[in-house]
Image: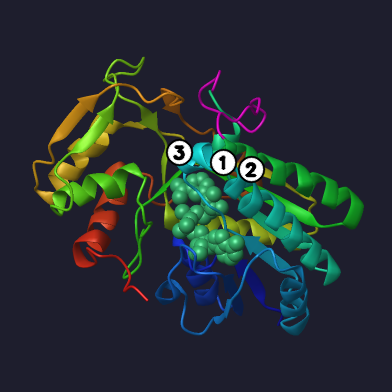
Amino acid sequence: MSAILVVGGAGYIGSSTARFLNKKGFDVVVLDNFSKGHPESVPENAVLVEGDLGNRELVGSLCSEHRIQTALHFAAFTEVGESVAKPEQYFDNNSFKTKNLLDGLVDADVNQFIFSSTAAVYGEPVEIPINEGHHRSPTNPYGWSKLFVEEILASYRNAYGLRSVCLRYFNAAGAEEGHGEDHKPEAHLIPLVLQVALRKRDSISIFGTDWDTPDGTCVRDYIHVSDLAMAHFQAMELLESGSAGGIFNLGNGEGYSVREVIEASREISGHPIPAEETDRRPGDPARLIASNKKAKEVLGWTPSRPGLHEIIQTAWEWHRTHPEGYPRQ
Ligand SMILES: NC(=O)c1ccc[n+]([C@@H]2O[C@H](COP(=O)([O-])OP(=O)(O)OC[C@H]3O[C@@H](n4cnc5c(N)ncnc54)[C@H](O)[C@@H]3O)[C@@H](O)[C@H]2O)c1
């Protein structure tokens, strides 16, 4: 059997998908440069290659050696604020190096590709829930760096027959047994809130309480990391069926406010989790909620852990038992 290449498979979502595929019986080859990832998160029987996604020769030879037909690409820099301060790093790592990766895949005749895109390609939404036809107008270099790749993929499909699925994730969250989120620095709301419960920070900031939402705080769509893994498997099946691929939102279709996240985290952790109300952050949309209709209809995907409590419960289990995350190298 040919193996699956998982680029960025030592990161939060990539490793979850690598473990999922491994359990399904696939041979998995992980390529990661460990700039952000953790070797301990990679399944033990996966082939783990330390290297850069921008290394076209390495990618080509890995694919030939392991008879790769499908590549899943999770590797990227992911912090919106950092992308505003250092855009060159984001265009380099997320866009230009991905073009090299794709060239390496084409060199080796790989013809199926799944890309981790993001809700950030939409920018400020004009319609909620957001469907895949919504206009795309990123408000930061991170979003643009991902949108460029979507465009490259459309051209490579036509020119080289590289069929691809772009999965636009909303807010990935939650954890699995023994594995979870470990970003340094951490920028995601749920782990930050839980850090207060672990006494690693004094309080959580709420950026704006006067948004046009039911409780005045921003609303986001949280999707469990295991449900993202499942969607990748279903996207692989779609490509295996000969489909040209497509673009799909991955979210629950439900929004939860910052206050709701904090309140649920208080109940789950038993910690009062002090919150500090501050000004709005420029560029934050009030609400980001996915329409997941297309993923349900075409991929047959149904989120299995849609509830905020369950998502936070699994995250709390991981952070409580691994307060420092994965062991440092
Ligand atoms: N976390 C979210 O909520 C979210 C939401 C939308 C989209 N995404 C996208 O999903 C993907 C995975 O996100 P994550 O949260 O798991 O991130 P992560 O930082 O945990 O994982 C990224 C992995 O890619 C590796 N990597 C980065 N640059 C590399 C390079 N040049 N060569 C080889 N490896 C490299 C890192 O070492 C890390 O293991 C990203 O592409 C991100 O843009 C994430």
Residue tagged 3: 81
Question: Residue at point 54% right, 23% down?
Answer: 125
Q: Is residue 286 above or below residue 245?
A: above
Type of amino acid at the residue the image marks with label 1: Tyr
Which quarter of the figure is the C terminus placed in?
Answer: bottom left
User: Could you tell me how far apart the alpha carbons at marks 1 and 2 are, in whole angstroms?
Assistant: 5 Å
For this view, does 180 lie left or right of residue 139? left
**Contact (Cβ within 8 Å) of mark 1 with mark 2:** yes
Secondary structure mostly seen in magenta is loop
- Where residue 52 sits in the image (x, y, percent)? 63, 68
The numbered dot on residue 13 is none
Observer-nearest of 196 and 290 = 196
Q: Which residues are magenta?
A: 125-140
Mark 1 Cβ inside 8 Å of ligand 1? yes
The numbered dot on residue 142 is 1
- Where residue 213 sits in the image (x, y, percent)? 34, 18
Residue 233 can be seen, yes or no:
no
The secondary structure type at the circle numbered 2 is helix
Q: Is residue 154 magenta?
A: no
